[in-house]
Image (tube, coloured by chain):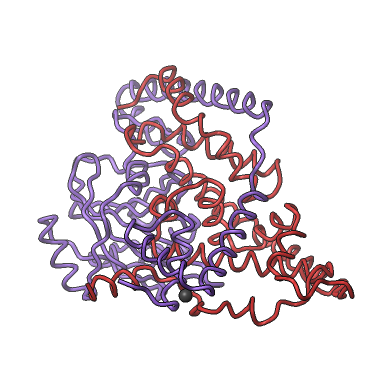
Chain colours: A red, B purple
């Protein structure tokens, strides 16, 4: 049933708009600037409002809103991708060839990870996040900023939980690699040695908790 | 039961994200307390995770934006009231004018849809179906899938075939639309640069169900409806046997339309297939 407009708006504002800060925060991290974030959130909220009658009131409203945000973001990203990505790629190339100079005092004997974390500024992390492809960026934003569970992320991104885990795993690893690249370019650390790139027990790109669970189930 | 160093990789991330069962967490802790390599690895991951969360903590929405949204919503509400009034007027016109006005309304004035009946358009319901849905049944053999679909829906249904090779039928699950039993087929669509979309197709016996949504497209003698519920793309189609096809996807709208038109959906009725008409119309 369609509810009366007035009642609908009151109900919508009370139930959905409480998540505005969360939506805005995620949008800010996905788009990297306040203007695009506002556009993305406004479009998300208006879409949600139009479809409010179709929303099952006892289900997870925050996840529902983030689903709309995610779809809207991906659709926009497709449209804008061409122009922006070309620009982005050109800039990334420029950055990579600029000033790859090692400072003599680079504290090579210390744990490079400590050095990296001590010298990283938020701006670099945000920049590294934006360099990730939208799937990885979304997984990291939904987990690390919004604190959604794997299951919720799987529903929002419409993929299996295993895919969420591998997107998170790879997303975080790519994030770390970008941060290393920035730090190397700034002369803070040297190009990471074996101890970092070949993380002892990492087996390839997948992180298969399911396989672990199946093995366990079979042996007990 | 003790775990091995080679098994900790998948456990560490899930542990830090709070996704392990108590038993798994205990097993990992036991191992980590005895193994320096894994302990170091885990604390490194933890520090990195904490740093990322701290650096990425986003700003909250400015007050001005709260006001802006409240205004936008009020505007939206006014538009809704206007559209509804308009719809009631149009449907109330007598005779042939009613049909003409109704068609005009559907074709031109549907940016904000004001449905004639009292239910949200089917596409909106289908699009919001994802959260909390039952798991997808994966069947390797497509004949088995057709059989179980027919058993379930009790109408002869065959999943459409797509001329696009990059569409893969992943599985299906039981669903409901407008209180009617439906089957939801889940496809993966692969595109260049490793991009992957999900396409869901709701199949249901749809006689007496209003399949209209936002934009009407006439293609040959066939009508399909195109919409963008919840930021996704949708295409709706009803075949001669009254089977309704509701496609929902996160891929761009034109891509989804092309995909549906490239399927064998209506080709079973030979001369008036959607595809055949489109081809001849395009010339
Ligand atoms: Zn170990």
Residue A2, quarter of the rendered image? top left
Look at the picture and state if B208 lies above or below A210: above
Q: Nearer the viewer, residue B224 or A13?
A: A13
| Residue B91 percent across, percent down from the top left | 34, 25
The residue lying at 69 percent from left, 54 percent from top is: A126
| Residue B71 percent across, percent down from the top left | 60, 23
Q: Nearer the viewer, residue A37 or A25?
A: A25
Q: Nearer the viewer, residue B198 or A219?
A: A219
**Seen from this angle, which residue lies furthest front?**
B34
Image quadrant occupied by the N terminus of chain B: bottom left
| Residue A159 percent across, percent down from the top left | 40, 60
User: Is A185 placed left or right of A213 in the picture?
Assistant: right
Q: Is residue A138 visible?
A: yes
The residue lying at 45 percent from left, 50 percent from top is: B232
User: Is B136 placed left or right of A142 in the picture?
Assistant: left
User: Is A139 placed left or right of A186 in the picture?
Assistant: left
User: Is B66 placed left or right of B185 in the picture?
Assistant: right
**Seen from this angle, which residue lies furthest top?**
A6
The residue lying at 46 percent from left, 55 percent from top is: B250
The residue lying at 48 percent from left, 46 percent from top is: B231
Residue B167, quarter of the rendered image? bottom left
Look at the picture and state if A42 lies above or below A3: below
| Residue A121 percent across, percent down from the top left | 76, 54
**Seen from this angle, which residue lies furthest bottom?**
A194
Q: Is residue B283 visible?
A: no
């Amino acid at each position: 049933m369609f509810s009366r407009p007035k009642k609908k708006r009151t109900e919508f504002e009370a139930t959905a708009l409480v998540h505005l800060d969360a939506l805005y925060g995620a949008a800010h991290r996905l788009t990297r600037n306040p203007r695009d974030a506002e556009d993305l959130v406004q479009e998300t909220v208006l879409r949600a409002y139009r479809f409010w009658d179709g929303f099952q009131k006892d289900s997870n409203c925050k996840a529902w809103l983030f689903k709309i945000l995610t779809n809207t973001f991906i659709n926009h990203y497709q449209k804008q991708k061409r122009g922006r990505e070309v620009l982005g790629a050109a800039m990334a190339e420029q950055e990579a060839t600029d000033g790859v100079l090692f400072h003599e005092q680079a504290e090579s004997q210390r744990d490079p990870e400590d050095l990296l974390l001590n010298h990283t500024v938020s701006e670099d992390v945000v920049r590294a996040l934006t360099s990730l492809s939208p799937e990885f960026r979304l997984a990291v934003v939904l987990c690390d900023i919004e604190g959604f569970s794997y299951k919720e992320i799987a529903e929002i991104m419409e993929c299996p939980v295993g895919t969420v885990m591998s997107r998170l795993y790879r997303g975080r690893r790519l994030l770390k690699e970008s941060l290393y690249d920035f730090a190397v370019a700034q002369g803070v650390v040297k190009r990471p040695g074996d101890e970092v790139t070949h993380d002892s027990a990492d087996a390839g790109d997948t992180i298969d908790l399911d396989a672990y669970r199946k093995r366990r189930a079979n042996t007990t | 039961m003790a775990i091995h160093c080679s098994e900790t990789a998948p456990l560490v991330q899930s542990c830090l994200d709070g996704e392990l069962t108590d038993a798994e967490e205990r097993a990992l802790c036991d191992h980590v307390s005895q193994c320096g390599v894994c302990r170091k690895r885990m604390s490194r991951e933890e520090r990195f995770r904490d740093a990322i969360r701290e650096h990425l903590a986003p700003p909250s929405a400015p007050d001005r934006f709260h006001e802006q949204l409240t205004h936008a919503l009020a505007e939206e509400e006014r538009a809704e009231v206007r559209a509804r009034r308009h719809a009631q007027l149009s449907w109330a016109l007598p005779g042939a004018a009613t049909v003409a006005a109704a068609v005009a309304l559907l074709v031109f004035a549907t940016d904000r849809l004001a449905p004639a009946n009292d239910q949200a358009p089917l596409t909106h319901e289908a699009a919001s179906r994802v959260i909390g849905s039952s798991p997808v049944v994966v069947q390797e053999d497509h004949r088995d899938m057709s059989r179980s679909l027919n058993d379930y829906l009790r109408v002869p249904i065959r999943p459409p075939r797509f001329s696009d090779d990059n569409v893969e039928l992943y599985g299906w699950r039981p669903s409901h639309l407008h209180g009617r039993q439906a089957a939801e087929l889940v496809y993966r669509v692969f595109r260049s640069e490793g991009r992957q979309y999900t396409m869901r197709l709701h199949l249901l016996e749809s006689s007496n169900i209003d399949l209209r949504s936002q934009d009407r497209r006439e293609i040959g003698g066939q009508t399909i409806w195109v919409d963008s519920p919840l930021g996704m793309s949708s295409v709706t189609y009803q075949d001669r046997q009254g089977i309704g096809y509701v496609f929902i996807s996160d891929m761009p709208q034109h891509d989804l339309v092309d995909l549906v038109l490239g399927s064998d959906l209506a080709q079973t009725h030979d001369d008036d297939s959607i595809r055949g008409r489109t081809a001849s119309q395009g010339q």
